[in-house]
Image (cartoon, rainbow, N blue to C red):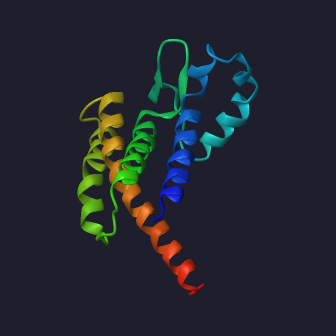
């Protein structure tokens, strides 16, 4: 994939991740408060936004829960890494299952009350899943561009 396309992908993921922390940016630019209702509604489409599961600094909260924050930041990290590396390997489902297992196990153990919710564990398992999950998205986009350039579509 061309560098310009990789940079656009990183920019889009970065903008999405900045939106997650938009409340935290209010001290730097108070005009952000105008967009908060729209952003809150937008992020509610991808996350349950349960207050006790949001990452907070005491004053401001993220727009998504700790697990979703990890997933999106993992995607951002992977998108940045992919600028420097050409990733052309076809991925099987096995890798995705391995890297999603800790997240699924965490959800299962929390659900059956083995332990209480941990934002750190949720964030960490989301980060792991998001960083690998993005590779599948990237592979799909790369294949789409190959097909578009070859005239198959």
- Residue 6 is left or right of residue 38, and the answer is left
**Is residue 24 at all visible to an observer of this figure?**
yes
The picture places residue 136, in percent across and down from the top left corner, at: 39, 63
Q: Which residue corresponds to the image point at 53% horizontal and 56% vertical from the top-left? A: 4
Q: Which residue corresponds to the image point at 37% horizontal and 59% vertical from the top-left? A: 135
Q: Which residue corresponds to the image point at 76% horizontal and 25% vertical from the top-left? A: 34
Outermost bottom residue: 152
Q: Nearer the viewer, residue 149 or 74?
A: 149
* Residue 27 to residue 95: above or below: above
Q: Which residue corresponds to the image point at 30% horizontal and 69% vertical from the top-left? A: 91
- Residue 107 is left or right of residue 50, and the answer is left
Q: Nearer the viewer, residue 48 or 73?
A: 73
* Residue 65 to residue 96: above or below: above
* Residue 115 to residue 134: above or below: above
The quarter of the image holding the C terminus is: bottom right
The quarter of the image holding the N terminus is: bottom left
Q: Nearer the viewer, residue 86 or 27?
A: 86
* Residue 54 to residue 17: above or below: above
């Amino acid at each position: 994939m061309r560098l310009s396309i990789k940079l656009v992908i990183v920019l889009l993921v970065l903008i999405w991740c900045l939106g997650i922390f938009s409340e935290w940016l209010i001290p730097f630019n108070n005009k952000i408060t105008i967009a908060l209702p729209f952003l809150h509604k937008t992020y509610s489409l991808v996350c349950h936004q349960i207050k006790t599961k949001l990452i907070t600094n005491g004053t401001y909260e993220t727009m998504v829960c700790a697990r979703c924050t990890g997933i999106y930041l993992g995607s951002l990290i992977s998108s940045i890494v992919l600028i420097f590396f050409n990733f052309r390997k076809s991925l099987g489902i096995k890798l995705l299952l391995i890297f999603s297992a800790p997240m699924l196990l965490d959800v299962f153990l929390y659900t059956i009350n083995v332990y209480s919710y941990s934002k750190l564990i949720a964030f960490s398992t989301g980060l792991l899943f998001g960083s690998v999950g993005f590779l599948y998205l990237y592979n799909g986009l790369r294949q789409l561009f190959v097909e578009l350039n070859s005239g198959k579509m």
